[in-house]
Image (cartoon, grey):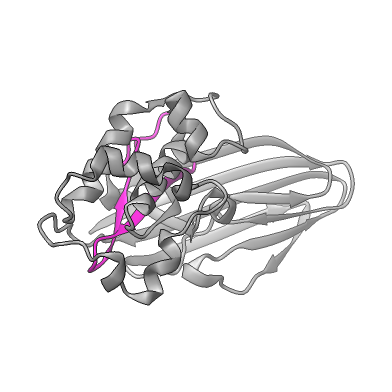
Amino acid sequence: MTTLNVQTRIGWTADDAATAVLSIRAAAVSGQSLLDEHLEVDGAEVEEVERRPLGARPLRLHAAPGPVSLTYTATVQVEQPASVSDVPLPTLRGLDPGLWTWTLPSRYCPSDVLGPTAEHLFGGAARTGALLEQVRHWVQTNILYAIGTSDVHTAADETMLRRTGVCRDLAHLTATLLRGLDVPARLVGVYAPDLQPPDLHAVVEAHDGRSWRLLDATGMAPVDTLVRTATGRDAADIAWGSTAGPIRLDHLDVAVERV
C-alpha cells in the first residue's frame, strides 16, 4: 500500500465566456482511498458533476472573460492487486460478457486494423497472464518515448508506423495490440511520481481473467504508485480537460510525491 500527495495547478485566460470540464480529481475506485482533498478556484464558477461510470469525478467550470486559476491537492492511498503470470487467459468464447466491450476497436485503438500484427507478434506466446507484460514490454522496447512527436489526432496504427510517441500513444498501442488478441484493455488517466517532466500520465489497464491489471508502457511509473483520475476506451474518454469557448492555457503544473 502506497500513500501519495498529488497537486495540479492550472491557469488559463478566457477571451469570452467559456466552459471547461476537468478530470483531475482522484477517482472513486476500488483499491484507491481518498484521505484528504482540497480545491481552490478563482475566476470561475465550479459545478459539481455526477460521478461518471468507472469512478471519474469530473468538474465543470463556467468562466467569465479573464484569467482563471485552479489548484487541486489530495492525499490518496493506493493498493494494486498482485499480478498472476501463470493463470490462463480466457478465450473470447469464455470471456465474461461484461468485458466484451473492452476488446472492441475505438477511435484511437483500431484493434481491427492491428489485429493481424498483434497475432504475428504474439500469436505464438502462451496465453497466460504473462502475455500482458510481454505486450507492454514490446511497446516500451520498440516505441521511442519522445515529447512532441504526436498530436491529439494520432492513433495507434500511426504510432506503430512512426515508432515514436508520448505516454498516450504508447498506451494506445499497448491497448490496441491486447484487444487484437481478444484481451480486454482500456486506458487510465493517472497521477504518477518520477515522471520527467512531471505531468498527468496515461497507462493501460488489461484484464487477465481474474482482475484488471495496470500496465505502464513507458516503464517510467511503478503501477503501485498510480493515482487514477479517469478510465475509458481511449484518450477521448480520459482527457484531463476539454473546453468549449475561447480559452488559452497559460500553465499546467503537476506534482506527485510519496508520503
Image point (31%, 32%), residue name: 140
Q: Name which residue lies at 28% across and 28% down.
A: 141
Quadrant of the image occupied by residue 51:
bottom right
Q: Nearer the viewer, residue 47 or 112?
A: 112
Residue 119, above or below 39: above
- Observer-nearest residue: 194 or 230? 230
Q: Residue at x 28, y 49 (%)?
A: 223
Residue 41: within the magenta?
Answer: no
Relative to 19, is 167 above or below?
Answer: above
Main SS type for the magenta part?
Answer: loop
Is residue 259 visible in the rendered image? The answer is no
Horizontal arrangement in the rendering, residue 182 relative to residue 201 (left or right): left
x, y percent for residue 231: 47, 59
Residue 166 in sight in this render: yes
Residue 46 x, y percent position in the rendering? 71, 63
- The span picked out in magenta is 192-221
